[in-house]
Image (cartoon, rainbow, N blue to C red):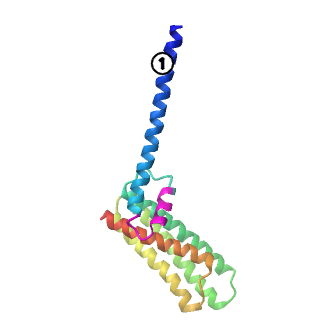
Amino acid sequence: MECFRYSNGVLFITVTQICFLVLLLSAEADDDKTIVTKVCDESLEPDVCLNCVLSDTSRETSNLSDMAHSILFCMYSETTYAHQTADNLFQNTTAVDLKEVFRVCKDKMFSASNTLWDGIAKMEVSDYKSAHVSARVAHADLLECDFAFMKYGKVLIPSELLNYMVQAKRLFDVAQIMFLLLE
């Protein structure tokens, strides 16, 4: 009987410890979201910032450099999707003017995604100034793609491409704030 009381006491302590651990982990998650929300609210695109940073499962902390890394990675992803879309449009277009627009755009989006990958590498060694330069160069490439539609085709950007470009532009706006806060 005494053995039974002892095991109940151990069980009670174990259950209490597990509950306490769950409480701590949920409080930690709330703190992370609170910190991320405060930083993202400083940007021009708080929803874009929150969606990107909170969806990054590889982010270990809620410090500013980790959040900026997440933003660059999301921007990299969007420019990669834009490149793939522009390349597909290029391959499936026969109109000469449009072919040139899509060629310029796919090249610029390829350059942007490569530049952002370099920026991500710079973030990983805490070279924030170089990473910021990479984000600016990628943004310039994004604008060159936009200008190509006005210069060569004088046509609207197809929605499947425009959506990725707009998202990358919004992420750039967030990255600007992140880098200003890092400096």
Give the amino acid at mark 1.
Gly
Q: Is residue 52 magenta?
A: yes
Relative to 51, say whether 28 is above or below: above
Residue 27 position in % (x across, y down): 43, 44
Predominant SS along the magenta part: helix
Residue 64, relative to residue 27: is it above or below? Answer: below
Residue 148 location, quadrant:
bottom right
Q: Residue furthest top?
A: 1
Residue at (42%, 66%) from the top-left corner? 119
| On-image quarter of the N terminus | top right
* Residue 106 % position (x, y): 57, 78
| Identity of the residue drawn at 62% across and 78% down | 159
Which residues make up the magenta segment? 41-54
* Near-viewer residue (21 or 143): 21
**Horizontal and vertical percent position of residue 15:** 50, 28
Residue 122 x %, y %: 39, 62
Comparing 24 with 150, the one in front is: 24
Left or right: where 36 falls relative to 93: left
Residue at image mark 1:
9
**Crowd class of label 1 (few under 14; some 14 to 19; many from 20; radius 10 Å):** few
